[in-house]
Amino acid sequence: MAKSIDVSDLNIYYGDFLAVEGVNITIPAKSVTAFIGPSGCGKSTFLRSLNRMHEVIKGAHVDGKVLVDGTDLYAADMDPVNVRRLIGMVFQRPNPFPTMSIYDNVLAGQKLNSKKMKKSEADDTVERALRQAGLWAEVKDRLNRPGSGLSGGQQQRLCIARAVAVQPEILLMDEPCSALDPISTSVIEDLIHELKTEYTIVIVTHNMQQAARVSDDTAFFNLAGVGQPGKLVESGRTEKIFSNPDNPATEAYIQGRFG
Amino acid sequence: MTTTLQRTPEPDLQRELQEHQLPTYLPKAILVGAVLAGVALTVAGPLSIAQAVIVAWLLTWALPIASRVVEGGRKAADRTVTLLVASAFGLALIPLGSILALVISRGGPQLNAEFFTYSMRNVVGEGGGIYHALVGTLLITAAATVISVPIGLFTAIYLVEYGAGNRLSRWITFLVDVMTGIPSIVAGLFAYALFVIFFGEGVRVGIGGAVALAVLMVPIVVRACEEMLKLVPNELREAAFALGVPKWRTVVKVVLPTAISGIVTGVTLAIARVIGETAPLLIIAGLTDSVNFNLFSERMTTLPVFTYFSVKFPGVPPEASIDRGWGAALVLIIIVMLLNLVARAVSYFFSPKGER
């Protein structure tokens, strides 16, 4: 059921400021696509535009097309709320709801929308989501404890469980491991491998090894200078981008040469 | 000459690091000594209490002076400032302590079952109680809360969640600031003028007092709620949006529950702020000796107004009435203190758990 994304000529603005310019990319279904690039080049901005989350920031808007299985997310009659139900997101910093238990955090997507669920159905959803996020074994005995009492890595997996519990078609991850230690990171990377059998996954990362480990495709973003818009430099199969990129800037960035 | 690693510190260095230290018991010793000296001077007779306090305070300066001589400039400055800060704290406690002592000593003997269960109807001289004023205070303040909390909370939600610095929200913020400075008597006149439109000249009604208090409460509630809503991390809103939750549900089910403890505390403190208002209630709620449970008709006495009239127009003989005034003042202070305790309990029990 996972869906592919086709982006054509996408410009992203914050007010009058053009943040990302002229992105054309195809993100295949049921695979992991990694966005890499230096800070401030617009990776996260572009990622947020894929589920219309960047509109949350005042004055932010886009022009261009984002097609999910041929449907334009930015068509006039599209409701951003429905778009976000289809395309889930995991953030850089774990952000479980502090007022809710672990159980309620996983069901947050349903509970906050006041969706009626049978108790057994809700229990199944929680267990399935927590198992998918690799957290079930650790928390199954304390589902009614507050979510904020977990460790950072567990909180991040709780956020992933929350995102998959609403069964989105696509999962966006904005540097999901940047605040985590290597062990939690590897748990989440294994998780990404398992999730890609069901979801289309897009991940932003600053960690080159991580991009090489988890992704099938890689897109490299760069910006020409301060105040200039970020651009998609090149994208393609991860092996190709990492071993034999077309653009010298990509090669320089991946090998750690700058300037 | 050979160079070796020096295992033991040089004696000079050791003294440099260790010396110049007043014994740790000295500050306490000086404080106790100063207090004892003050007590002794008062008991022995040569000084009044105020003079003895001043002498004791001057004696405590022995500590910074000793520190200057033994420990040097930096520590002496530290001890001087510590002494000044502690003195300022003590000074600030004097009015608080003396008010409490006075009100408790004059009002305390009044508190008995009759005082809480009788009104002043047909009471001349001794006897009677504050039942009618207690009922009036609780009803009028409750009504004021019911009016002002929705207005204040919704205004704060608009300012934080929807206005986001646009022209309207800047105007609202400005007007709320202006409202904060409205003298309470003006709020009373406003309520009176408003009710005169509907009920004619000379109207006295409890709900009018509630309206006047609400005018005073709204800006406090707006400010408190606004600050609390701003404290809710934006990440939580984004987390909810990313799950496909509409904005209004995010506000109702994520932002408000996260901020609820601060909001309740702010509202409670706003109540404590207006419950002692006298002037607006004098104008619009009036004075009566009878119990009145109906906010919408007839006069209604509140504790501050009762206190004012008991002391200002005690009748003949005046003692009983003035004593009742002190008793009412004590009850008012107790109510405010209970409200503060409730606010603390609420913020303890409602605040998000887990990190503690």
Image (spheres, rainbow, N blue to C red):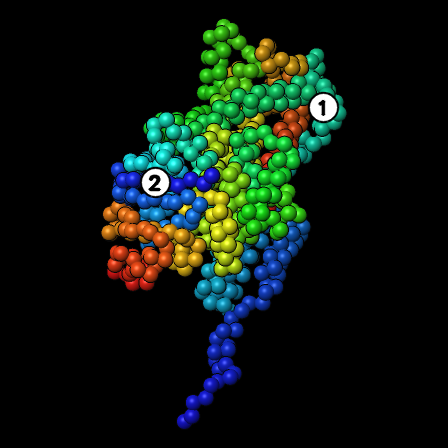
3D distance between C-alphas at marks 2 and 1: 79 Å
Q: Position of residue A255 (x, y in %)?
A: 32, 63
| B325 w.r.t. A217: above or below | above
Query: Which residue is found at the position 44% from the left and 38% from the top?
Result: A87
The amino acid pointed to by label 1 is: Phe
Q: Nearer the viewer, residue B62 or A93?
A: A93
Q: Which residue is mark 1?
A: B115
Q: Is residue A199 visible?
A: yes
Q: Nearer the viewer, residue B21 or B269?
A: B269
Q: Residues within 10 Å of mark 1 (few under 14, many from 20)?
A: some
The amino acid pointed to by label 2 is: Asp
- Residue A6: which disc? 2
Subunit that carries the residue with mark 1: B
Q: Position of residue B307 (x, y in %)?
A: 61, 23
Subunit that carries the residue with mark 2: A
* Marks 2 & 1 on one chain: no
Query: Which residue is found at the position 49% from the left and 56% from the top?
Result: A185
Q: Is residue B279 visible?
A: no
Q: Position of residue B243 (x, y in %)?
A: 48, 37
Rendered-image quadrant of the C terminus of chain A: bottom left
